[in-house]
Every structure is written in structure tokens, then in C-alpha cells.
Image (cartoon, helix red, strand yellow):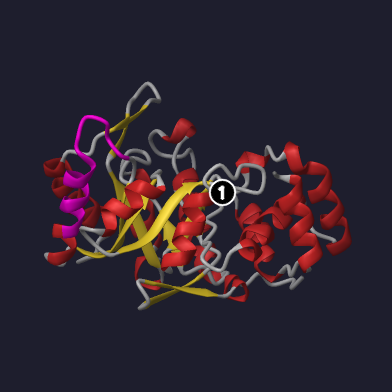
Amino acid sequence: MSKTPDAATAGTFDLDGETTVNRLGFGAMRLCGDDIIGAPDDEENAREVARSAVEFGVDFVDTADSYGPGTSERLLRESGIVDDAVVATKAGLLREAGGDWLPHGDPDYIRNQVLVSKDRLGVDAIDLYQFHRPDPDTPFADSVAAFAELKDEGHVEHVGLSNVTVEQLDEAREHVEIATVQNQYNVANREDETVLEACADAGIGFIPWYPLAAGDLGAVGDALDAVAAAHDATRRQVALAWLLAHSDVTIPIPGTSSVDHLRENVAAASLSLSDDEVARLTDAGE
């Protein structure tokens, strides 16, 4: 593995066939304070992490209006990286002061939030705007239609979904072209394999959130450790390399508030697993 991390070695993916990004991205949720509420203790460190991600070749950064709320988007703008990366954000999920995540897919709310996110990020249009989570109190089609309108009006370049089923993906595609789907997925948790397969069939990017399970990959720990030892790598690096190798449409977005941890994550882009190693890890997680 290269001593200088370079996300470009992970290969690329084209959002909607037109916007090219390196397949190893960065998740900016951890730039916030404890429990993803408020500002971190050291805001300059958070900005430095974001700048380092771009220095390490990351050109796809994922955030959301609910991270903070608003803190992550603001820190990304202040870090100065918004012009150097494709920045994806989300709307449709509230962060309650007590720590609860509350779905809110009302179309009027979504139309309002795109203006808020544009202002926080300091952009004329959001690169990738994602519906954060379906709201049981709002018809799914109504929420998606709001995203489609925002794209038509030029507020949004690309539209994505998050936490959806195959059926919801199919329904959304009747209203607007879908560039990406972001669902929970990692080497130890593949409950949404069918969603990944649907994305691969349609040429849609699949962004696995929780790609490292916060380090809790015990179910496949022995297999990860064996492969890691063969490559002088870490368990987490192998877990990221597996995601990249498992499907050509995956765009992992490991997050961190540490430059050292970021460096380790990005170094996984250059870790090449053999077919046998990929199969071994795949089998271990089934």
C-alpha cells in the first residue's frame, strides 16, 4: 500500500453518467459535537480534517442538514473545500435535541431546506441532494416530487435517496433520475444486498453508510484479520477495500474527526484484494 494516501486509486464513478468522483469519499457527520449535536470542541481541527480529505484525493464529501443540525455544512464551507469536491447533502430527517432522528418529508419543508443548505454551503446549486429517509406521515411520491422540482429549478444538480427499499427506488425513478442510494451496508451487514444489486443493474451509485460499523465488525473479524495480516493493513482498511471490490458502484464514505484516522481510511483505496480474499470475506459475512 502507498505511504501517501490517494483516494483516486480507488477508481471513479460517474453520477448520472456525467459527474465523475473518486470512489472513496468522506462522511462529514463526525465533524460535529458529541451525539452529532452542536459544534465540536475544536472547530479548527474539524476544518483541517475536511481540508486534509481533499489533499488526500477525496473529491466526494457527504453531509446533511441534520448533522449539528447545520454544523457540518457550515464547517465544510469554512474549510474552503466546497469548490474542490462534489458535496452531497440531505434533507428529510430532523435531529432532535434529545438525540432522536425524526423523519420529516413534507415537500414544503424540503423546498425550504434546500435554500438553507445552499446558504450554509455557500453554493448556487447543491451537487447531490438526497432524501434522507422516507417519512411514514408523508406520501413517498410527494417527497420525491419535491426533489425533482428542485432539480428542474436548478437548485440541485443530482438527486439521491437514502434508507430506501428496491420498491421505493423504482417508484422514485418514475419521478426523477436517481444518481445515488445511501443505505446502511458493510462487510458484516448486508441486509440491503438487493438494493445494491438494483443500483448496479441501473448504473446508480450505492453509498454504504456505516461502512465500518464504528469498528464493530466482530462477525467477520477473524477473516478481516487474516487478510489484513497478509497485506500489512488494518482490519478497517480491509473492510473498506472489500466494499470497493464487492461492486463497481459502491462509494464508501468513512467518517472521522481525526486526520490520522482519515489518512488510514484513505490509504485503503490502494489496497488490492485478490478474488479469493474478496470471496472469503463475502462468505464470512453471510
Write the residue at 71% across / 56% down: 237
Measured as percent of width and height from the top left, residue 191 is found at 56, 42
User: What residue is shown with label 1?
Assistant: 256
Whether residue 134 can be seen here:
yes
Which element is circle 1 on? loop
Q: Quadrant of residue 280?
A: bottom right
Whether residue 73 can be seen here:
no
Quarter the N terminus occupies: bottom right
Q: Is residue 272 above or below residue 143?
A: below
Write the residue at 58% across / 64% down: 247
Magenta segment: does it hold 95?
no
Judge by depth and name the residue closer to the eye, 42 or 54.
54
Write the residue at 36% across / 39% down: 68
Q: As drawn, is 26 to the left or to the right of 281?
A: left
Q: As drawn, is 279 to the left or to the right of 186?
A: right
Magenta segment: does it hold 139?
yes
Measured as percent of width and height from the top left, residue 181 is found at 41, 55
- The overriding secondary structure of the stretch rendered in magenta is helix
- The part of the chain drawn in magenta is 134-148
The local crowd at label 1, few if under 14, some if 14 to 19, many if 20 or more residues have their Cα within 10 Å, is many
Judge by depth and name the residue closer to the eye, 116 or 51.
116
Measured as percent of width and height from the top left, residue 222 is found at 84, 44
Q: Which amino acid, mark 1?
A: Thr
Quarter the C terminus occupies: top right
Q: As drawn, is 91 to the left or to the right of 72?
A: left
Q: As drawn, is 109 to the left or to the right of 170?
A: left
Q: Is residue 230 above or below residue 142?
A: below
